Image (cartoon, helix red, strand yellow):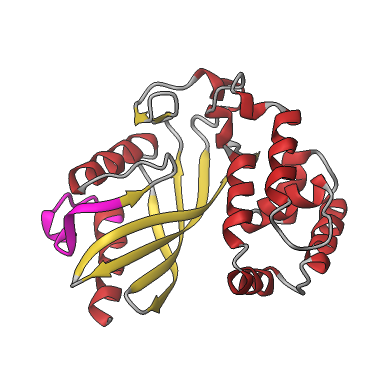
Amino acid sequence: MQKYREYVDGFFNGFYNNRQNDPSLLSYVSNQVIYNDITGMHLGKKGMLQVFSSAFKAFPDMTIEIKQIDAFGNNIIASVDNKGTYVSAFMDPSKRRYQSELQEGLSTITPEGQTVEATFQACFTFHHGTLSHLTFTNFHFLKTIGYLDFNALANPNHPNHSIERRYMQLIYKLARIPEEAFTPKEVECFCLCLCGFSAKQIAQNLGNSYRTIETHLSRALSKIPAFSKLHALEMMVENRTLSVWQELANILLY
């Protein structure tokens, strides 16, 4: 497992920070690797290189710092912070591919020229000594003058952007959770919390006060019942409801 740790460390520090487009950095990676990025695309080794190349165009001075690396069997989970100057958008959600032009939907909140900080978790899964699955989760973006909502890239006319439709989906999904009834706001706050957003960021996103969001989160935890987000996740794994909350989060974010 130590060699996997060294690989993950080398992957980020070498591939990202030193910009060494060296095939040896992907020596553990199988050609059929499944890479789950924020668009949900499944890519091979060549596709991974294309995605990272596009990311460098958006953040040409991007630096990566690994905060923590944990090992669980054949899985390595790295908690990562990165920072870079935002130059241009590179994701086109309508075509599910990458581009360099700025999306119209981002024009009102464009952070072009600003420093953007992002934290996320990268899960590396190894199979017979090769990287078989790479997943980036809990993306959390901040810019120098407030929260950067990357969901503005999505089409505002999409039916999932309808508040009424969104809450209908939430209520339908929530019926599968054998707990006391949650209010829509409690569901919304708790789902965003599970995605990695802090109470302050949720407040900025939803237009509520920080204390109000904390109250919604506290009530949601008490209904699970749990005393912390970590405890709630443990209970969800035990009673097999974690996937339901993840579905709810996807409805909210996408």
Comparing 162 with 218, the one in front is: 162
For the N terminus, give its image quadrant: bottom left
**x then y, percent, for residue 182:** 82, 54
Q: Residue at x 46, y 50 (%)?
A: 83
145 above or below 94?
below
Examine the image and state in which quarter residue 131 appears: bottom left
Any magenta on residue 5? no
Q: Give the extent of the magenta segment.
A: 17-34
Examine the image and state in which quarter residue 239 appears: bottom right
Labels in figure, total: 0
Q: Residue at x 26, y 74 (%)?
A: 4
Q: Is residue 143 visible?
A: no
**x then y, percent, for residue 156:** 61, 22
Q: Residue at x 82, y 52 (%)?
A: 213
**x then y, percent, for residue 31:** 15, 52
Comparing 178 with 76, the one in front is: 178
Q: Residue at x 45, y 39 (%)?
A: 85
Left or right position of 254 against 44: right
Q: Is residue 188 visible?
A: yes
**x then y, percent, for residue 55:** 35, 40
121 above or below 98?
below
Comparing 219 with 53, the one in front is: 219
For the C terminus, give its image quadrant: top right
